[in-house]
Amino acid sequence: MPAGSNVRSASFGPEVGRSMRTVLVGGTTETARIDGISAAGANREAMVHTPSADVEIIEYGAPVLSPVVPVSPSGCPTPAVVTRAARELLGFDVLAVDAGLARPTGAPTVTVGEAVGEDVREACPMLDAEGVFENGRRLGRALPDEELVIGETIPGGTTTAMAVLAALGERVTVSSSLPENPLSLKRRVVREALAASDLQTGEAAGEPIEALRRVGDPVLAAAAGIVRGASEVGIEVVLAGGTQLATVGALARHGGVEASLTLATTTFVAEDRSAAIDDLAGDLELDLRITGPGFDELDHPATNAYVDGEAKEGVGMGGALALCERAGVPPVDLRERYLAVYERLVAGDERAVKA
Amino acid sequence: MPAGSNVRSASFGPEVGRSMRTVLVGGTTETARIDGISAAGANREAMVHTPSADVEIIEYGAPVLSPVVPVSPSGCPTPAVVTRAARELLGFDVLAVDAGLARPTGAPTVTVGEAVGEDVREACPMLDAEGVFENGRRLGRALPDEELVIGETIPGGTTTAMAVLAALGERVTVSSSLPENPLSLKRRVVREALAASDLQTGEAAGEPIEALRRVGDPVLAAAAGIVRGASEVGIEVVLAGGTQLATVGALARHGGVEASLTLATTTFVAEDRSAAIDDLAGDLELDLRITGPGFDELDHPATNAYVDGEAKEGVGMGGALALCERAGVPPVDLRERYLAVYERLVAGDERAVKA
């Protein structure tokens, strides 16, 4: 949709009528291959397609070239379905950013990184952190919008985010796409990650590129670059996500970004004590905005898993819900559209099986 | 813009309410480096940026990462300005396809080809014609739309199109972005091209991939693939352009596509006798649709060059004008928006110079 007809709705703050774009940064970290660390895919084989499929769902309403509809091992649909539903109601612009997708996508993307992130337990899993960050920064500076809402899709990303928070010396919180957060596993991985890159907790404070290079992932690098660039030219930034986007905020703060930043996340993250998202947002001076889809009003296979604590956030879900609220969309309309998008995906899936 | 709120307007035919997407295929042929063959850039240095800048203008309304605003040597603005103006009025979806851009673009793209096309006077300038065609075909098959409006941006493309028409044994017509079409130069280049690839006129009839491989360019290959794929799944196709898009139609026909195809071009091409677009469309059973922007109603540096025969077509201009007409947009509104987009570009250019 052209800038001339961008979504113009009441803003989070006092300003009104700003042009807005949702930026979805997709990429890969081999960290996701650690058994039991992520639910962003039906299985390890399928998970590698998740970011490519997520951006197709946001762009087209369904996967086009990707062979999978991303679901958790229990069948919980990707949060991309929520963001797509919001987009169908609000008509906002989307820019998908390829920070290192492992599989081709049929959605148009701007490429800021070519390589997938290595396993965070390797020494320096993001060798080109600076290049990806600078590409993101250049893009963020160049965009013509007044407001960017930035989300992510990268399986395993909560664990790399946890490692980056540790490297920066920030509160080490972590959310999970699993209902039972594998905390002890993640803590062990983070310890191993810091050790592999010869890094003490807090040693990369004030050095965001170093934190990214030693224990980060390409999505964190790209998103942090976009936030930096956008802030440099006065574009307002909404971080649409949970602990990963809070970590992007931490990287921005450690790089000297002083602009106000909003962290728009879901009630599911807010209710997750291990995420401690309000404390983290407070530490980093992020304006926290919490919005829920009211899925507890329904009893449906596509929503019950969320109510039970799966998925929680991702692919800009918290930001998309906040945009709906800002525009005055009744929650029941969002839920109806969510189910419609879900049914379309399921139908497409059946066609794919038959084909 | 989501499929759910796609442009839904009266169609060219009897159907109404179809979901539509404009596909812009960008790429490069070294043929453009031949002195005097193309006006798709202020000079040879600038011309290499034209396709990357064109897709940014369609996406954002102005170049973002590209260093140039594409103009002809005399200052005639790129037809992307017309297509962008139409998009701002109609809000249609755009998909930019990278078939081999020579320079990075800040617009999101789906990549179907990595290599630029060699000079058509080399033997087999499109070695991977089949790969690019098949990638395009896969994309065309996968898109969720009911109608695709397909345009191009590739300096030098009218000459490669002329060579492909010759290879297929079709009527060898040719338009030009220059007011005085350098016909004898183009004829010589086409003769040299056929000779270099050891091809007789008409020798590649019925073999579109072979014609592309020996005398084509990446945009023709990608667009022909998209048309083939879209036709295979019943998506209606509008070829938005002049002799290049007619050549895409020829490649489709020689590959066995029997579906109805519309060729939507401008009055400027229709009035160019060397293009003989009505004869070419007739030969290929393309439904010809001719629409003009009424630039002769104005007296402005941004429109006078068109009236004098420069540019004529490109970046989907003829299709964009047809979409405006179909939606009942008064031509005066289109012209006003065109000037507004142009003024924005000029202002941006001045900022770029100052920065």
Image: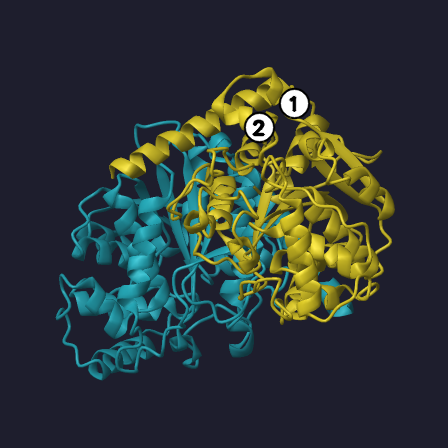
Chain colours: A yellow, B cyan
Mark 2 vs 1: CB contact within 8 A:
yes
Q: Amino acid at mark 1?
A: Val
Label 2: chain?
A
| Residue A240 locus on image (x, y percent) | 68, 42
Q: How many marks?
A: 2
Q: Pointer 2: what residue?
A: A89
Q: Nearer the viewer, residue B305 or B47?
A: B47
> What residue sits 71% from the left and 64% below the top?
A194
Which type of secondary structure does the marked residue at label 1 adopt? loop
| Residue B161 locus on image (x, y percent) | 30, 66
Q: Pointer 1: what residue?
A: A329
| Residue B188 locus on image (x, y percent) | 28, 80
Label 1: chain?
A
Q: Is A13 located above or below residue B213 in the figure?
A: above
Q: Amino acid at mark 2?
A: Leu
Q: Is residue A271 left or right of residue A253?
A: left
The quarter in which the N terminus of chain A is drawn is top right
| Residue B117 locus on image (x, y percent) | 37, 73
- Disc 2 and disc 1 on one polypeptide chain: yes
The quarter in which the C terminus of chain A is drawn is top left
